[in-house]
Image (cartoon, helix red, strand yellow):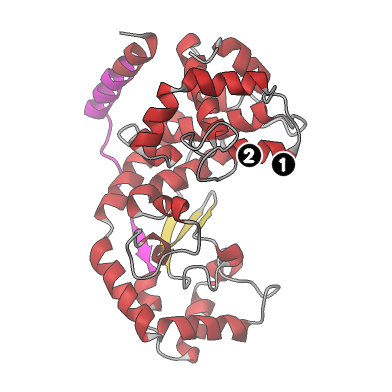
Amino acid sequence: MNDRKLLKSIIAVLFLLAACTSKEVSPIVIERLDAEMINLKTRAEIQHFLDKNRNLKETFFLSETDMSDSVLVDRIYQTVTNPAFKKFYNELNKSAGDLGEVKTQFAEAFSQVQKLYPDFKPPKVKTVISGLGHFSRDAAALFVSDSLIVISLDFYAGEKATFVPSVPNFLLKKYTLQALVPSIMSVLAEKFIVTNTEDKSLLNDMIVAAKKLEFTHEVMPETPDSLIIFYTEKQLNDAEEHKNVIWAHFIKEKLLYETNHFKKVKYIGDRPYTAEIGTDCPGAIGRWVGWQIVKKYRDENSDVTLPALLSNPDSQNIFMKSKFKGE
C-alpha cells in the first residue's frame, strides 16, 4: 500500500470515529425560488418578486447598470410565460424532484468544511431560473459568496434536456445535477486559498487550480475525480497512462515558468483536448498536472494539513517539496 492510500485509510478511520461521536449533519434548506418564479403571471408580480428578493438583484440578476428595471422585468416575463420554457421547466422539475441528493451532498460537504475551518458558516442556498442566462449577470449559472449561493436551476437539466446552456458540447458535462455541488465547492475553495499575485507563471496557475480540486476532493471524498475535474473516465485513464509523455512535454517546452497569457491558456483553459500534446490529451491538462503535483506534495508532507496547504502562496515551494517528476 503506497503512502497516499495509507493516508486515505487513516483519514477514513478517523472520519468514522468522528462520525460516531459528533452530532448529525445539519439538514440543508434550499429555498426554491425557481418554483415561485415559474408561476409569476404578470409584470407587477415579477416586480414584487424582485422587490421582495433584493439580494438577487444585487448579486445575480442583471443590475440597473446593465439595464433598467423594466427591461429586467420584461426579460423575466418573456421567459416564465413562454409555453416552451414552461414545458422545459416541468421536465426539469420532474427530474430534479426535491433536490434530495443535492441537499445531502451540500450537508456532507459543509460538514467537512466545518471540520477543516470551525468558524465556517454555511451560506444560504437559493435556486432560481434565469432563462439559461438570459437575465443573469454574465449569463452566469451560479453565484457563490460567504453568505449566499444562488443556483440557476435551468442550467442543470442535463445534456439531453430540451434546452441546454449555450456552451460547446464538451462543456455540457459541467451542467448536470451530479456536477452541481462539486462545481460550487471548487468556487468556495477560493475563500480559503492564499495566492501570490506577483507570480504569473503557469506553474502558479496550475497549483492554484489544483488546490481547488484537492479541496473539493477533501470535502466530497465519495465523489469521483471525473466529476471534480470534469473529465470522462476515459480521459482520466488516458492522462494517467500517458503521464510521463505529458510531463515530458511540459519540461521540453519549458512551460512551468511560462508567463505568456496566450500560451498558458492553452494548458489551463477549457478546450476539448490539448492539441499541443495530442488529440487524446484532455483539455486543461495543466490543471490535471497541477493536481498530480499537489497529491504528491501531500504524500511527501503528510504532516501538512489541507488548510496549511491552501494558505501557502508559494507554488514553487510546493512543487519542490512534492518531488514530482512525472511519475
Residue at numbered disc 2 = 266
Type of the residue with mark 2: Lys
* Callout 1–callout 2 Cβ contact below 8 Å: yes
Q: Is residue 301 above or below residue 95?
A: above
The percent coordinates of residue 305 (x first, y second) are 49, 20
Type of the residue with mark 1: Phe
- Where are the magenta residues, as a range? 10-32
Q: Is residue 236 above or below residue 17?
A: below
Determine the residue positioned at 50% across, 64% down: 166
The percent coordinates of residue 142 (x first, y second) are 50, 57
Q: Quadrant of residue 237?
A: top left
- Helix, strand or loop at mark 1: helix
Q: Is residue 161 above or below residue 315?
A: below
Answer left or right for 87 relative to 144. Answer: left
Q: Is residue 202 above or below residue 40?
A: above
Q: Total number of numbered labels?
A: 2
Q: Is 12 contained in the magenta span?
A: yes
Q: Is 283 contained in the magenta span?
A: no
Of 301 and 170, nearer the camera is 170
The percent coordinates of residue 284 (x first, y second) are 54, 38
Residue at numbered disc 1 = 262
**Residue 243 in view:** yes
Determine the residue positioned at 65% across, 26% down: 203
- Mark 1 Cα-neighbour bin, 10 Å: few <14, some 14–19, many ≥20: few
Answer left or right for 56 relative to 15. Answer: right
Determine the residue positioned at 44% across, 91% down: 42
